[in-house]
Image (tube, rainbow, N blue to C red):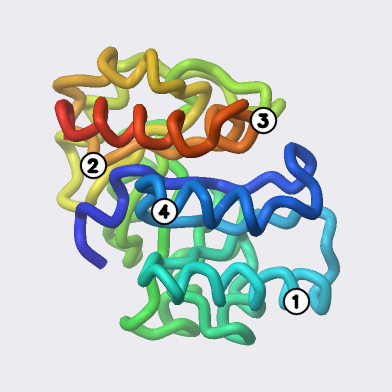
Amino acid sequence: MKKNDLMLYLVTDRSMCGEHLESVVETAIKAGVTIVQLREKQADFKEFCDKALKMKKICDKYNIPLIINDNIDVCLAVDADGVHLGSSDCDIAKARTILGNSKIIGASSREVKTALLAQNAGADYLGVGAVFGTNTKSDAKAISKDILKEIANSVNIPVVAIGGITADKVSELKGCGIAGVAVVSAILKAQDIDSTTKDFVCKLKQIV
């Protein structure tokens, strides 16, 4: 995985665009999204795999990495590029043993201690937030930009900021040492997916 892969990280939420999700993601990829995480909290294994295969076809078409949220079995079943594990999910070291060195493993962190533990256990990147609060995850408490910067400066792996990030707020993260931002509603619920994504890319190139 190249550091630039993480610049504009789209995390999916089917509740925001229903069965149009695949076409919305494809539009966003063509406009500049660099990596996609498929999150399907309500799906069983078979349904998750079916949706992951559809998404993988799109991501492969544009050579964009596909990350599976929280489910190693689905990642293996569809041969996705990697998995993202939250703080309450599978142990990172165990995941690395199962997935081997060829797959990407992302981990969530809110403090330097857990960030270093994740790095040492084999994580390839960190998702840190919520930097501006968020309505997407009810349990995600906001962290300060100082903590974000401290985490980014404490680890040797890339850090992606997440949580309530809009194109208008990207410039506020300048100097924090991040490799990119992860976005959900700001793109998925945008009236114009193409122009919103391009706006993100333009502003991110000035700070990443």
Q: Depth check: 192 or 70 in front?
A: 192
The residues tagged by marks 4 and 1 sit, at their Cα atoms, a distance apart of 23 Å
Residue 26 visible in the displayed image: yes
- Expressed as whole percent of the image width and height from the top left, the position of residue 193 reads 53, 36
| Residue 31 image position (x, y, % from top left) | 39, 46
Residue labelled with disc 4:
30
Q: Which mark is residue 136?
A: 3
Return the disc, 2 or 1, that comes first in the chain's sequence.
1
- Provide the secondary structure element on which disc 3 rests: loop
**Is residue 85 depicted above or below 46 in this figure?**
above
Contact (Cβ within 8 Å) of mark 4 with mark 2? no
Of callouts 4 and 2, which one flags the residue occurring earlier in the amino acid sequence?
4
* Residue 146 in sight in this render: no
Instruction: Assign a secondary structure to mark 4.
Output: helix
How far, Cα to Cα, is label 3 from label 4? 24 Å
Question: Left or right of 60: which side holds 175?
Answer: left
Whole-Å distance between the Cαs marked 3 and 1? 24 Å
Q: In the image, what residue occupies the spot 41% across and 76% down?
A: 96
Q: To which residue does mark 1 refer?
A: 50
Secondary structure under the numbered disc 2 in the rendered image: loop
Q: What residue type is labelled 2?
A: Ala
The N terminus: image quadrant: bottom left
